[in-house]
Amino acid sequence: KKVEEQKQVETAKKLEQGTHEKATTTDHNEKSSE
């Protein structure tokens, strides 16, 4: 159980990082096109 939970936590962190990176890139692109 603990191993599965750890994997879920790592996956969640990766997803959060990916989403944050995309959001940052989008924000940067919007500022650049102004």
Image (cartoon, grey):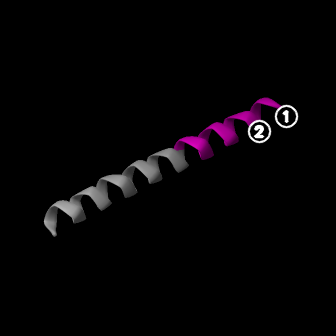
Magenta span contains residue 22: yes
Q: Residue furthest bottom?
A: 1
Highlighted magenta segment, given as a residue range: 21-34
16 or 2: nearer the viewer = 2
State the residue at coordinates (60%, 43%).
Answer: 22
x and y percentages locating residue 16 in the rendered image: 46, 53
Q: Which residue is drawn at 63% across and 37% down?
A: 25
Residue located at (83% from left, 31% from top) = 33
Q: On residue 34, which mark appears? A: 1
Residue 11 position by quadrant: bottom left
Give the image location of residue 18, x and y in percent: 50, 45
Q: Where is residue 27 in the image (x, y as percent from the top left)?
A: 68, 42
Q: What's the distance in space between the residues labelled 2 and 1, CA to CA? A: 7 Å
Relative depth, front residue between 10 and 24: 10
- The residue carrying pointer 1 sits among few (fewer than 14), some (14 to 19) or many (20 or more) residues within 10 Å by Cα, namely few
Callout 2 touching callout 1 (CB < 8 Å): yes
Residue pointed to by mark 2: 30
Using the image, determine if residue 30 lies above or below residue 3.
Answer: above
The residue positioned 73% from the left and 34% from the top of the image is 29
Secondary structure character of the magenta stretch overall? helix
The quarter in which the C terminus is drawn is top right
Which residue is outermost to the left? 2
**In the rendered structure, which amino acid carries the disc numbered 2?**
Glu
Q: Is residue 33 magenta?
A: yes
Q: What residue type is labelled 1?
A: Glu
